[in-house]
Image: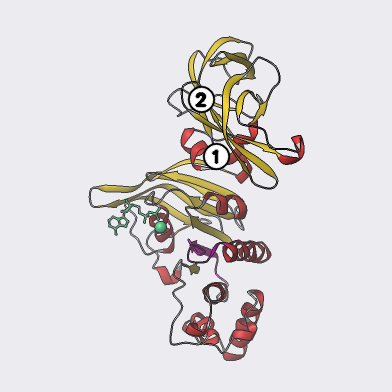
Amino acid sequence: MSVDVLINNVTKRYGDFTAIEDMSFKINKGEFFTLLGPSGCGKTTLLRMIAGFNTIEGGDILFDTTNINKLPAHKRDIGMVFQNYAIFPHLSTYDNVAYGLKARKVPKDEAHKRIMDALKVVQIEQLKDRMPHELSGGQQQRVALARAIVIEPKILLMDEPLSNLDAKLRVQMRSTIKKLQSKLGITTIYVTHDQEEALAISDRIAVMNLGKVMQIGSPDEVYRRPSNDFVADFIGTSNFLEGKIISSENGSMIIDVMDYQFTVQFDKNHQGDVLLSVRPEHFFFSEESKGIKGEIILSTFLGDFINYEIQLPNGDILEVNEYTEKVGKIRNNGPVTLQINEKSVSIFTRDGKERLVR
Ligand SMILES: Nc1ncnc2c1ncn2[C@@H]1O[C@H](COP(=O)(O)OP(=O)(O)O)[C@@H](O)[C@H]1O
Ligand SMILES: [Mg+2]
């Protein structure tokens, strides 16, 4: 039985320092929800509040309609997986997974069945008699995962569970976790500072900075429609350019960037200076004279696409990607003209705080 998790005006203070400031959002039943943000932004703090290991200085946390602010951690029905595995070094795989069921006094026959099922789900049945020191990092993390799910928790909390694994294993484990979560349908709150991992694994992501939520959305939304310059910068690669609105009529506006002018559709009319964020794949090379002038100074072949560093007359560098298939060869260093895919560009107020386009 999984639950909705409501975070209502939640605040966490450590002395004078506010680690989580008046935060509110809802995580839906069965959802894979990720807290993403730079180190120190408050992800672990919030997760520990949900788990019951941190006091709550303001607001309420609810599981469905039950307020859990004062409920002790062991009564919250939560499974947890940490970065450092935290499995018991003196217990075998089997006994590690059995631990939570013993504590809950589950009868032996039923416990055995559930342990074997959990080991099977994470594909380590054959390692059931091994001790932790006889397991690789990835295998230990599977033990931690089996131990968390065997108790059939209402909520699964994971704090950077893959960050101690090497790159290849990380990708493998992330798909194991994602498949497992969607099969079990447990509401899952996952913490990571790795934007690529968050995009790959989540149903929705809360992008956090300095104890506040910057945006909540699906991976597609936070990547393609960032709410502000922080999100645009933190997720994926963004080229920031300063521009100016030179005319605005009926939701259609002409933007000027370094004498290159193009039209975008706005929700409401605006005036003055703006900040543009353009993904590397949202530029294209143009044979027309109209566009942003620059010079290719470096090209990097990356298989499916080629990445170009393009220096502008003011010295700034843009990153531009072009699919290898599109031109079939690497462009030579030298002068080029770039245009922008006007449907994909993000446009913010000049301070970067407010998104102006859909
Ligand atoms: N027990 C604590 N006492 C005081 N400050 C803390 C404590 N735990 C975390 N902090 C501070 O709260 C902020 C958020 O920390 P944390 O939640 O661990 O961030 P994250 O998990 O996003 O890296 C940081 O500035 C950190 O130094
Ligand atoms: Mg942390």
Q: Is mark 2 within 8 Å of ligand 1?
A: no
- The x, y position of residue 337, in whole percent, is 63, 22
Q: Quadrant of ligand 2?
A: bottom left
Residue 67 image-quadrant placement: bottom left
Given the image, on which type of amino acid does mark 2 rest? Leu
Residue 86 image-quadrant placement: bottom left
Q: Quadrant of the C terminus?
A: top right
Badge 2 local density, few (<14 within 10 Å), some, or many (20+)? Answer: some
Judge from the rendering whether residue 249 lies leftward or rightward of residue 240; answer left or right. right
Q: In the structure shown, which secondary structural element does the residue marked by tag 2 occupy?
A: strand
Whether 162 is among the magenta residues is yes
Whether 91 is among the magenta residues is no
- The x, y position of residue 325, in whole percent, is 76, 40
Q: Is mark 1 within 8 Å of ligand 1?
A: no
Disc 2 designates what residue?
241
Q: How is the image coloured?
A: secondary structure
Residue sitting at x 49%, y 55%: 192
The magenta segment: 153-167
Res 26 seen here? yes
Badge 1 local density, few (<14 within 10 Å), some, or many (20+)? Answer: some
66 and 6: which is toward the camera: 6
- The x, y position of residue 214, in whole percent, is 46, 39
Task: Name the magenta segment's main secondary structure.
Answer: loop
341 and 1: which is toward the camera: 341
Residue sitting at x 39%, y 64%: 52
294 and 40: which is toward the camera: 294
Disc 1 designates what residue?
237
Judge from the rendering whether residue 113 lies leftward or rightward of residue 309; answer left or right. right
Res 2 seen here? no
Given the image, on which type of amino acid does mark 1 rest? Thr
Looking at the image, is 70 positioned above or below residue 135? above
